[in-house]
């Protein structure tokens, strides 16, 4: 089994998960059908399924074309997205187990960016595909839920094993780390990761995947209990409590303006 990132649009990632034995492949989030199909062809794979994390067009824009061009393809996405995932054939719910292209995966409901946002977790691959909920050193904007919804969703992901690889929906890492350093400049792991990410991007290289363990050390949205982050936030908001949801909401608001 291998995970092949396929860049989409300006900063999106689609991911092909390919079974080396059967040559069957599944794509997680497809904005542009042609770039994904080119990669499938180049590698001699057979595309059998699409897993959509949420309804936004930069994650599902290729669904209709894939359904038209690939006979028999299955398209999975959350029932909770209320029919907004194009060409859906297999609606899924939180906790479902799915079997695609020789691979068993679990659906994790992680709402807030959208009401029906899901992640796909493959324990045998130690891989998590989390769309626009958890980014490297960041998290998605809270469009359809509340801050508390996002905190619960992020906690669910942070509870996965530390060595779980994190494949997120966008290359936002460098900017996220720059923001993280403004609220936790004394975190050595964060400084190191920032320098690494800047060097990677200078060479036009990807920063995915991260791991859950690394994110717990560097991602401010998973670090609402950090004394330094709390102190940083209280400097500009003296009334702020230590409630993790309040800290999260303040962090998210600051990042929205960053
Ligand atoms: Zn989105
Ligand atoms: Fe997106």
Image: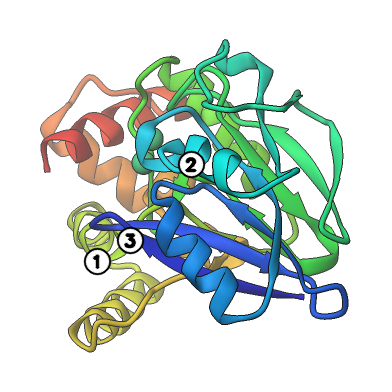
Which residue is nearer to you in this view: 158 or 132? 132
Q: Between tags 1 and 2, which lies in front? A: 2
Mark 1, residues whose alpha carbon is within 10 Å: few (<14), some, or many (≥20)? many
Q: Residue at x 55, y 29 (%)?
A: 117
Please tell me whether residue 249 is drawn above or below residue 63 in the rendered image: above
Mark sitting earlier along the chain (1/2): 2
Residue at 40% across / 46% down in the picture? 31
Distance CA(mark 1)–CA(mark 2): 32 Å
**At 69% from the left edge and 72% from the top edge, which residue is drawn?**
45
Q: Report if residue 232 is visible in the image.
A: yes
Where does residue 14 sit, x and y in percent of width and height?
Answer: 48, 57
Q: Which residue is mark 3?
A: 171
Quadrant into which the C terminus falls: top left
Q: Secondary structure at mark 3?
A: loop
Residue in view at x 48 percent, y 69 percent: 38
Left or right of 8? Residue 36 is: right
Question: Residue 57 at what x, y percent from top left?
Answer: 37, 33
Instruction: Tell me where residue 198 sits by quadrant.
Output: bottom left
On the rendered structure, is 191 left or right of 111?
left
Looking at the picture, tell me which residue is in the foreground, 2 or 66.
66
- Compared across the picture, whether 155 is left or right of 186 comes to right
Which residue bears the numbered disc 2? 65
The residue carrying mark 1 is 174
Q: Residues within 10 Å of mark 3 (few under 14, many from 20)?
A: some
Asked if the residues shown at circle 1 and circle 3 are in contact, with their CB atoms under 8 angstroms apart, the answer is no
Report how far apart the C-alphas of labels 1 and 3 lie in the structure: 8 Å
> Is 177 in front, or is 68?
68
Height in image: 82 above or below 36?
above
């Amino acid at each position: 089994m291998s995970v092949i990132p396929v860049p989409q649009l300006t900063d999106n990632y689609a991911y092909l998960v390919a079974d080396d034995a059967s040559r069957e492949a599944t794509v997680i989030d497809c904005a542009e059908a042609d770039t994904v199909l080119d990669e499938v062809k180049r590698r001699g794979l057979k595309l059998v399924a699409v897993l959509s994390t949420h309804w936004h067009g930069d994650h599902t824009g290729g669904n209709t074309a894939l359904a038209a061009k690939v006979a028999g393809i299955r398209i999975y996405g959350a029932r909770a997205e209320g029919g907004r995932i194009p060409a859906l054939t297999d609606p899924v719910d939180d906790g479902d187990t799915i079997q695609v292209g020789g691979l068993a995966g679990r659906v994790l409901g992680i709402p807030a960016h959208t009401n029906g946002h899901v992640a796909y977790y493959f324990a045998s691959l130690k891989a998590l595909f989390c769309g626009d909920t958890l980014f490297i050193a960041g998290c998605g904007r809270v469009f359809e839920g509340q801050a508390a919804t996002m905190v619960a969703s992020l906690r669910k992901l942070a509870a996965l094993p530390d060595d779980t690889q994190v494949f997120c929906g966008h290359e936002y890492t460098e900017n996220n780390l720059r923001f993280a350093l403004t609220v936790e400049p004394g975190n050595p792991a964060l400084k190191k990761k920032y320098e690494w990410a800047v060097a990677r991007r200078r060479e036009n290289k990807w920063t995915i995947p991260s791991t859950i363990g690394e994110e717990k050390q560097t991602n401010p949205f998973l670090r609402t209990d950090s004394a330094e982050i709390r102190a940083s936030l209280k400097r500009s908001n003296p009334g702020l409590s230590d409630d993790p949801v309040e800290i999260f909401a303040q962090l998210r608001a600051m990042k929205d303006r960053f």
